Amino acid sequence: MSHLQIEFLQRLTINSRNVLKYENPELQAKAKACVPLSDLLARAHQACSSDAKSDTKLFRDALLVELLTWFKNSFFTWFDTAHCETCNKGMQSVGLGVPNPQDVRYGANRVENYKCSSCGATDRFPRYNDPEKLLETRRGRCGEWANCFTLICRALKYDARYVLDWTDHVWTEVYSERLNRWLHCDSCEAVCDKPLLYDVGWGKKLSYVIAFSKDEVQDVTWRYTRNQKEILTRRNLVSEDWLLQQTNRLSRQLQSSLSVSQKELLTLRLIGELAEFLLPREVKAGEEQGRTSGDITWRQTRGELGLPQISHKPIVWVPSEEEMNNGEFFLEYSASLDQYVRRSDGNKTTDKWSNGVFEAESVFRKIEHDWNMAYLARTEGSAKGLLSWKFDLSSTNLMILQATVSCPGTTYEDGEIRWKICGPDYCQILSNARENVTGCVDFEVDLSGSKWCVLSAEMSRGRGDSAWQHAQIARQSTKELSQFPLSLRIFFGSAD
């Protein structure tokens, strides 16, 4: 074998052995004990519709989403640099150190050293590779995150595999019994089933993406790209035939003790997966975003911030037959549920904030699980975030008479939210949210004679690294399930 083949095979072999640690019953029990399962079960139950709550397979997928969210927001923390507790500032990296026996025991063959430039205090960050140790430390970068999260998935009896990207990232895949396919799960980003995130959103030039589990070693590169021909030009370390032979050989070794029926099941899954790889891939919502985990300067250096998210399919609200008969449109939004309810049309609901906005630029929904709060904010690193909602009567012979708006906003430091509502010939500036005060409540606007109107909000300013968090729209407790603080109510009638 060539030198490149030897190195490649070593990497395949080491990772195929490492994932077997997840199968230790005692370790799984320890991991499961870390999970607030009753709380996550309740959240998953709440997320499912009444008809779906009896569907065990769908419920398991809903629980997986809640598990991802909890892991990112409540359990694990991202490590950028050591922090000096005395000076309350980040320390400077001073290179690598020598692992001590305890470091080596837990797989930390690499140790980062840090020093405070003000007081001279030092600290060290061992890169632990033992998932049991990570249950205790609960911090790291993508390697530690994926390692620990995959263990927890196995502890909850999900079929899970550890996915290694040769361009320096790792994540997890979980098999969905409902969909009969593998789901991409990135615990660092708390995203599920967004496989084009790295290709489209982060702009990564992928080459080899390999998945490892107790049963198989599988080349899954094709799930994560829209352009297989382009990726093939970058796959020049080993031949395709050689790679297939090695992954098949390792998979056979892992399956050597399985029963005939178990092997048949895995073969059927593999056939379905290979068929999936042949299908063209369309970009889904959420796959265009840049990386959110890690220091913004670090992400910018890696070129993973993605492009500014200014494109959005505009949603325009038009009156239903019932609303035309009653002369009223009444829409409300809850950040805790991430849901719109159309009071004027039989309380019909629309999930997700982005499915109701006319314009969206650099905005996302933030959940603070430690404080049990949810709100809309601008994305980290952006100077401003823009949102707007549009109601249009142009296809009717009706005209707007009046609008009533509730525009809740919460600000910190010098964060600012500017609200306004506009018709074709007139704009009304609404009360700005400044100095931690709430925006307008039931603010009445005369838009008589207008065929359409647009309610808009611009979030800006703020201080320091958390500036994006200093202007928040519709902030509310995640336990407030009946409150819809953001509302747009429009009365309309005949043009005569």
Image: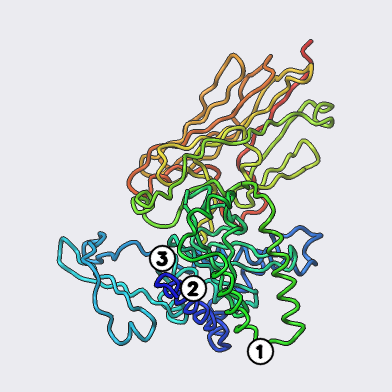
**Earlier residue among tags 3 and 1:** 3
Would residue 115 be found to the left or right of residue 72 on screen? left
**Placement of 50 over or under 128, stated as above or below:** above
* Colour setup of the view: rainbow
Sequence-wise, which precedes: disc 3 or disc 2? 3
Indicate the position of residue 450 as horizontal and vertical percent values: 67, 17
Identify the element where label 3 is drawn.
Answer: loop
Q: Amino acid at mark 2?
A: Asn
Q: Which residue does the numbered mark 2 point to in the structure image?
A: 147
- Label 1 sits on a secondary structure element that is loop
x then y, percent, for residue 241: 57, 67
> What kind of residue is marked 3?
Arg
Question: How many numbered tags mark residues here?
Answer: 3
Identify the disc placed on residue 141. 3
Classify mark 2: helix, strand or loop: helix
Q: Nearer the viewer, residue 212 or 377?
A: 212
Please state if 5 lies on the left or on the right of 113 as rendered: right
Lower sequence index among marks 1 and 2: 2
The residue type indicated by label 1 comes to Ser
Residue lying farthest to the left in this orientation: 119
Closer to us: 5 or 301: 5
Give the answer, above or below, for where 223 lies relative to 339.
Answer: below
Determine if residue 35 is in view. no
Question: Mark 2 packing: few (<14 Cα in 10 Å), some, or many (20+)?
Answer: many
The tag on residue 257 is: 1
Number of residues whose C-alpha sits closer than 10 Å to that of mark 3, classed few (under 14), some (14–19) or many (20 or more) = some
